[in-house]
Amino acid sequence: MTVALDLDPDQATPWITKAEPTHPSLIDSTHVINELFGIRNVPMAVWIDESGHLVRPAEAASIERSPFLDMDIDESWPERIQESLVEIKKMPDSSADYRAAIIDWVDNGADSPFSLSADEVVRRSAGRPAEHSAAAACFELGQHLHSLGNHDAAVDWWKQAHALHPENWTYKRQAWTIETTPPGQPSDLQQVATETYGTTWLDDVREAGGGAVYNTAPDLTA
């Protein structure tokens, strides 16, 4: 099952429709799965078995190699586009191995070496300090205010969420996209939100250590 994270369901609807009727797809317009499973970026996944038990915690979940990794950078492109692609190309690609792990789990269930024990799931799960819980509350308050049309007040709370949990890219990308996407247009991928948030996707990726550490790479060791 795929769940899109977007306060604006219209942004995700075309992808949901494209997946019909063979692939169950939902829209989480309040970022509930962030709090339930520790999702901090997209695409990420958790594995849940037939008994409802979590057998792998949240981790990067690509099953196809990104075409950006093999794209040649054209020097005639705007500088920011080139710099963004440089960081994207640093992102590790484990798509083939991750896809193979999923297939192994489907074939072998609990006997798959990629299906983890409860203790191992807990060990590998990211902790949730008080700051992250406070960030979740701030983000939720921002959502509520945004839904009421009080966007300026929402921004203040979202800024606090970003400061309290800077590693949570879903909080940042959601707020930046709302700020930089014109009404009725597809989501802005560059997310240059300097006017409101004083930063951009590229700036924060670099501040965090670059594309190589941008997401939580899956640990596929048996």
Image (cartoon, rainbow, N blue to C red):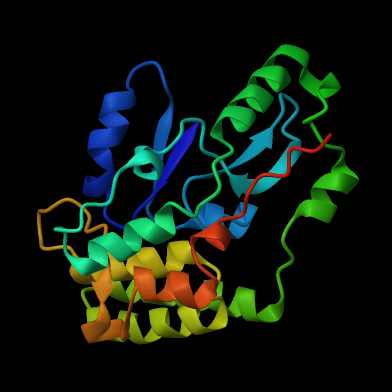
Q: Residue at x 76, y 36 (%)?
A: 53
| Residue drawn at point x = 33 percent, y = 70 percent | 175
Question: On the rendered structure, is 153 left or right of 209?
Answer: left
Quarter of the rendering occupied by the C terminus: top right
Relative height, residue 18 to residue 30 (above, below): above
Q: Is residue 30 visible?
A: no
Q: Position of residue 146 (x, y in %)?
A: 28, 72
Q: Is residue 98 visible?
A: yes
Instruction: Judge by depth and name the residue closer to the eye, 105 or 190.
Output: 190
Q: Is residue 81 left or right of residue 136?
A: left
Indicate whether 17 appears above or below 154: above
Q: Position of residue 7 (x, y in %)?
A: 32, 58
Name the residue located 82 percent from the left edge and 23 percent from the top edge: 110
- 109 w.r.t. 74: above or below: above
Query: Horizontally, is 95 left or right of 52 in the view?
Result: left
| Count of picture labels | 0
Give the x, y percent position of residue 84.
33, 62
Residue 58 locus on image (x, y percent):
64, 48
User: Which of the 4 image quarters holds residue 87?
Assistant: bottom left
Residue positioned 71% across, 69% down in the render = 128
